[in-house]
């Protein structure tokens, strides 16, 4: 959401600064997780990742990994400018014996350094896969070290059907029943369907899971109030 997926490596610096200002003032984050946006999804789609390791996908994986590092560095610099010390982690660096070990970044969190995670590409056997920011969020929820989570997207929340196609689509402040989603072009990690699935699973381990439109950073301050615009699962 802080990038524009339609254009390669398009970072919205101004919006990110506004989000950081509100997040720091209202939430005091314990961890920050970045999705791929135009730094990850664009090249993953172009190079056929996920996919088997070959000369073409190896080149793509290298580019994606470097690009995600650049994105995390830009976001980290902005939060540091607001007095929040961060330390970046890729899930590929945390993988040990087929599992993702979060003990090191959680140790940083105990020292008041905010771990900043980002989705990334990784090699499993001879197959390149993507470890999404949503999966990292779910992993962190399962650690038992957090009480709530906030997703920032480019829509107001989760709707009963696609608001881009149906003008009468209804915003679901609380979700009941099953929802069908249409995959957005260029999103290689499941789009809103995966986000909804992750939120439902995360809610089993957290008190609340929120999803709001990050294009309006001021809405972050309405969490827990009657003015809240978004979706919550608790």
Image: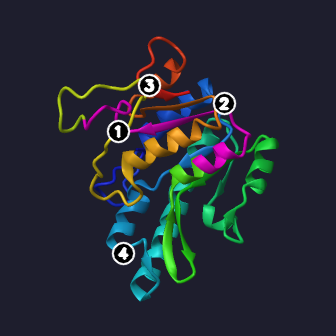
Q: Position of residue 225 (x, y in %)?
A: 51, 13
Q: Earlier in the sequence, mark 1 or mark 4?
A: 4
CB under 8 Å between discs 4 and 3? no
The residue shown at (17%, 29%) is 167
Q: Earlier in the sequence, mark 4 or mark 3?
A: 4
Q: Is residue 175 left or right of residue 185?
A: right
Real-space Cα distance between discs 4 and 3? 38 Å
- Tell how many labels: 4
Closer to the camera, 15 or 56?
56
Q: Position of residue 187 (x, y in %)?
A: 35, 56
Identify the residue position indicated by label 4 in the image. 47
4 or 3: mark nearer the eye: 3
Q: Earlier in the sequence, mark 2 or mark 3?
A: 2
Few, some or many residues within 10 Å of mark 2 (<14, 14–19, 20+) = few
Q: Quadrant of the N terminus?
A: top left
Q: Quadrant of the C terminus?
A: top right
Is residue 147 in the magenta section?
A: yes
Stretch in magenta: 138-162
**Mark 2 falls on what kind of element?**
loop
Real-space Cα distance between discs 2 and 4? 38 Å
Identify the residue position indicated by label 1 in the image. 179
1 or 2: mark nearer the eye: 1
Position of residue 230 relative to residue 133, above or below, is above
CB under 8 Å between discs 1 and 4? no
Q: Residue furthest bottom?
A: 55
The residue shown at (47%, 83%) is 53
**Mark 3 falls on what kind of element?**
loop
Q: Earlier in the sequence, mark 3 or mark 1?
A: 3
- Residue 174 is tagged as 3
Identify the residue position indicated by label 2 in the image. 28
Q: Position of residue 166 (x, y in %)?
A: 18, 33
**Mark 1 falls on what kind of element?**
loop
């Amino acid at each position: 959401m802080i990038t524009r997926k339609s254009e390669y490596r398009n970072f919205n610096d101004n919006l990110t600064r506004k989000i950081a200002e509100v997040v720091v003032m209202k939430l005091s984050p314990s961890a920050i997780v970045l999705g791929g946006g135009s730094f990850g999804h664009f090249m993953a789609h172009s190079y056929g990742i996920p996919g088997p390791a070959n000369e073409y996908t190896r080149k793509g994986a290298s580019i994606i990994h470097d690009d995600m590092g650049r994105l995390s560095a830009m976001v980290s610099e902005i939060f540091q400018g607001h007095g929040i010390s961060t330390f970046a982690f890729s899930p590929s660096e945390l993988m040990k014996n087929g599992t993702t070990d979060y003990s090191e970044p959680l140790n940083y969190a105990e020292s008041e350094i905010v771990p900043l995670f980002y989705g990334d590409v990784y090699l499993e056997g001879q197959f390149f896969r993507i470890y999404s920011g949503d999966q990292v969020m779910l992993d962190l929820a399962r650690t038992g070290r957090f009480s709530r989570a906030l997703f920032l997207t480019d829509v107001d929340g989760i709707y009963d059907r696609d608001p881009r196609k149906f003008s009468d689509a209804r915003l679901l402040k609380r979700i009941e029943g099953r929802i069908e989603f249409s995959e957005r072009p260029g999103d290689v990690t499941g789009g809103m369907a995966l986000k909804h699935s992750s939120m439902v699973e995360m809610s089993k381990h957290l008190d609340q899971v929120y999803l709001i439109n990050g294009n309006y950073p001021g809405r972050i301050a309405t969490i827990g109030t009657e003015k809240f615009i978004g979706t919550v699962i608790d």
